[in-house]
Image (spheres, grey):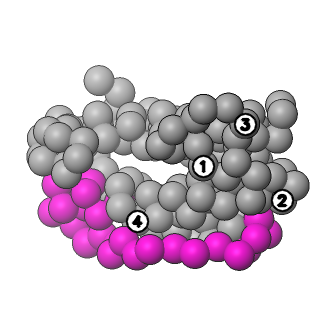
Amino acid sequence: MATAAEAQAAIAAAFESYISELAQAASVWETKPSGAAEGEDAWCARQVAEHIAGAGPFFGMGIARACGIDGPTPARISLPDAAAAVEETKRCHGQLVDVISKVTDDQMGIEFEAGQLGKQSVGGLMGVVSYHLKDHANQLKTLRGG
């Protein structure tokens, strides 16, 4: 299992990759992928951005509860354009960072029920966060034809 610092660094790197892609998403803000995509794969950039902006507080809340620390309250997010999305996503991601920056190596193995993700450890969920950001960064890149 990764240390808390390693997991925090992986999330930071994945977020930078995601924000870089989001900053370039204005041209495909309402463009759906061509073909027979379903579920999240059928989302336009706006839907991806709203999902990721909301995911920071969502994941932060779960990790905070598992660790017994204060965490954010998730809320539905609506983003009018890519510029607003970058700023709001940074703000929301900051709520996650406020939580994960307090996670210690001793807390990484704490297991808890993470809703639709099932039983997770704190470290496992931090790994999910990193993967989630990278996955949606790639989705935005694909939407742009990159």
Earlier residue among tags 1 and 3: 3
Amino acid type shown at disc 3? Ser
Residues under labels 1 and 2: Cα distance?
Answer: 14 Å
Query: Would residue 122 be counted in the magenta stretch?
Result: no
> Does 67 appear in magenta?
yes
Label 1 vs 2, first from the N-terminus = 2
Can residue 98 be seen by looking at this rendering?
no
Give, as a single range, the part of the protein colored magenta: 60-84
Q: x and y percent of residue 63 in the render?
A: 27, 54
Name the quarter where the C terminus is drawn: top right
Among numbered discs 2 and 4, the one appearing first in the sequence: 2
- Answer with left or right where residue 83 lies relative to residue 91: right
Q: CA distance from mark 2 to mark 4?
A: 24 Å
Task: Say whether residue 60 is left or right of residue 37.
Answer: left
The location of residue 56, given as percent across then percent down, is 45, 59
Instruction: Looking at this view, name the residue that lies furthest to the right.
Output: 27
Q: Is residue 73 above or below residue 20?
A: below
**Is disc 4 surrounded by few (<14), some (14 to 19) or many (20+) residues within 10 Å?**
many
Earlier in the chain: of badge 4 and badge 1, it is 1
Figure label count: 4
Asked if residue 116 can be seen in this view, the reply is yes
Answer few, some or many: residues within 10 Å of disc 3's Cα (few below 14, many 20 plus, some between 14 and 19). few
> Which mark is drawn over residue 43?
1
> Compared to 140, does 69 lie above or below?
below
The residue type indicated by label 1 comes to Trp
Q: Nearer the viewer, mark 4 or mark 1?
A: 1
Q: Which mark is residue 57?
A: 4
* Foreground label between 1 and 3: 3
The N terminus - image quarter: top left
